[in-house]
Image (cartoon, coloured by chain):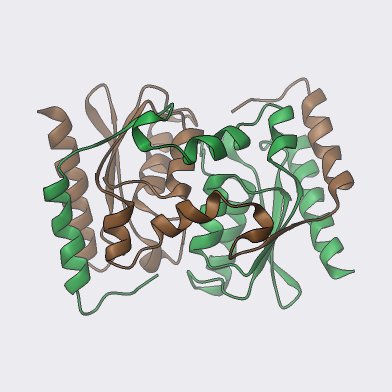
Chain colours: A brown, B green
Amino acid sequence: MAAANHMRRAIELSLEMMRSGRGGPFGAVVVKNDQIIAEGFNQVTSSNDPTAHAEVVAVRRACQALSTFDLTGCEIYTSCEPCPMCLGAIYWARFSRIYYANDRYDAAKIGFRDDFLYQEIRMPPRQRSIPAKRLLRAEGRAAFEEWDRKSDKIPY
Amino acid sequence: MAAANHMRRAIELSLEMMRSGRGGPFGAVVVKNDQIIAEGFNQVTSSNDPTAHAEVVAVRRACQALSTFDLTGCEIYTSCEPCPMCLGAIYWARFSRIYYANDRYDAAKIGFRDDFLYQEIRMPPRQRSIPAKRLLRAEGRAAFEEWDRKSDKIPY
């Protein structure tokens, strides 16, 4: 079955790249028309990039391969349920479907904060463990108003 | 006041880079010990990278500048409240504090889906507009168990 094979490849990446010391035990593949068009694996610690989760890496590579920022019609197979960062990336890229093997609770059991992030993100910005404060609201608005009026903008 | 100046730089980036056609009206700066150590702006459409939001770009650049994946003690100033993807990146990088000017509702008014993403992310994976399905749970678990036992792992 194709879906199972795609997931097996994501899991294989998670094992191989963890063993080679590239980062955490996470792999992902992007599939279009039942073919893998990009692969990603966690490389946070080896590349000094906290955003280099398997899904983000796979999304960026798929977009480079297809020369687009819009992956409509693509599916992502990931060895673990996407964290909020990766889920956001998947939405911005307009994926059609997500498949995952481990979930956020499995990740918590081996020391990852995915479930904690899902809890934090629901909270009002001021009450989170990383507090957020609003500043210069009126000055910030100018750029948004100009974007709204901009005639040659590229929506995404 | 230093905080206001840092935010003004983030807003300036949002305006300048939007005008130059690099992407949406969003800028961000990373500050450590009251000095800007990295800047970012939205470049989704110009770089074909849906993850190239201002905050993600600034986080990646700050980590390269400091040769680390851990930005403990840093603050981020962003011209708009971070979307769930960027908020996740900020948590993984271990920022101490977030400042923002526009918010998710301002972003919605000019056509951006930040608030929609905050709503989606709360929902059970199967019920979202991009549905997520679990697959090969038992096979995925092997990599997690190996990570748990791994003696030379680098936590992040």
The quadrant of the rendering that contains the N terminus of chain B is: bottom right
| Depicted A22 relative to depicted B108: above or below | below
Total labels drawn: 0
Q: Position of residue B131 (x, y in %)?
A: 36, 29
| Depicted A131 relative to depicted A9: above or below | below
Tell me the residue at 50%/31% (across/down): A69
Query: Looking at this view, is A66 or A93 the one in front?
Result: A93
Query: Looking at this view, is B125 or A149 the one in front?
Result: B125
| Depicted A12 relative to depicted B121: above or below | below
Q: Position of residue B48 (x, y in %)?
A: 52, 35
The quadrant of the rendering that contains the C terminus of chain B is: bottom left
Query: Looking at this view, is A145 or A129 the one in front?
Result: A129
Q: Position of residue B26 (x, y in %)?
A: 71, 43
Q: Position of residue A18 (x, y in %)?
A: 23, 63
Could you tell whether A149 is left or right of B89 in the image? right
Tell me the residue at 47%/49% (across/down): A85
Could you tell whether A153 is left or right of B124 in the image? right
Tell me the residue at 9%/28% (across/down): A1
Could you tell whether A33 is left or right of B60 in the image? left
Tell me the residue at 58%/69% (across/down): B65
Residue B74 visible, this angle = yes
Residue B20 visible, this angle = no
Q: Residue furthest left?
A: A1
